[in-house]
Image (cartoon, rainbow, N blue to C red):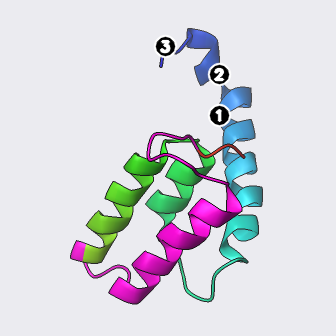
């Protein structure tokens, strides 16, 4: 993804942080467990589902999420964002 220098202005950075702050609770409300911030950030940033699954697996290996919650998160994200392929991007 090519970035322009304009993407790094104070205003744009503040807007991105505000957007993340607003969207985190929107995503989190669908789950009965806490989702680690780096997974939430990747969901908000629109990474593909394969990447999100890899991050969930990493969180599982680092004991940041239980195995059951990791599986539920993957299944529910597919449902919520209508993911058909591992390469589909999550669009917010």
Image quadrant assignment for residue 8 = top right
Give the image location of residue 26, x and y in percent: 76, 66
Give the image location of residue 46, x and y in percent: 58, 41
Numbered marks: total: 3
Give the image location of residue 37, x and y in percent: 50, 64
Give the spatial CA distance, label 2 vs label 3: 16 Å
Give the spatial CA distance, label 2 vs label 1: 6 Å
**Which residue is drawn at the image coordinates 49% and 13% (left, top)?**
2
Mark number displayed over residue 2? 3
Residue projecting furthest to the front? 84
Answer yes or no: do the residues labelled 2 and 1 have beta carbons within 8 Å? yes
Left or right: 50 in relation to 40: left
Element marked by disc 2: loop
Q: Is residue 26 above or below residue 51?
A: below
Mark number displayed over residue 13? 1
Answer yes or no: do the residues labelled 2 and 3 have beta carbons within 8 Å? no
Per the image, the residue denoted by label 2 is: 9
Left or right: 46 in relation to 37: right
**Which residue is drawn at the image coordinates 64% and 81% (left, top)?**
31
Crowd around label 2: few <14 · some 14–19 · many ≥20 (10 Å): few
Ranked by sequence position, the earlier of labels 2 and 3 is 3
**Which residue is drawn at the image coordinates 62% and 20% (left, top)?**
7
Image quadrant assignment for residue 61 = bottom left
Crowd around label 1: few <14 · some 14–19 · many ≥20 (10 Å): few
Q: Which residues are magenta?
A: 61-89
**Which residue is drawn at the image coordinates 67% and 55% (left, top)?**
81
Ranked by sequence position, the earlier of labels 1 and 3 is 3
Query: Would you say residue 66 is visible in this rendering?
Result: no
Element marked by disc 1: helix
């Amino acid at each position: 993804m090519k970035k322009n220098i304009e993407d790094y202005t104070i205003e744009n950075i503040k807007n991105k942080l505000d957007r993340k702050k607003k969207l985190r609770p929107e995503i989190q409300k669908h789950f009965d467990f806490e989702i680690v911030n780096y997974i939430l950030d990747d969901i908000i940033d629109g990474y593909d589902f394969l990447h999100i699954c890899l991050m969930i697996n990493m969180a599982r290996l680092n004991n940041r999420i239980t195995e059951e919650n990791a599986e539920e998160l993957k299944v529910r994200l597919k449902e919520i964002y209508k993911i058909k392929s591992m390469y589909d991007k999550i669009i917010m």
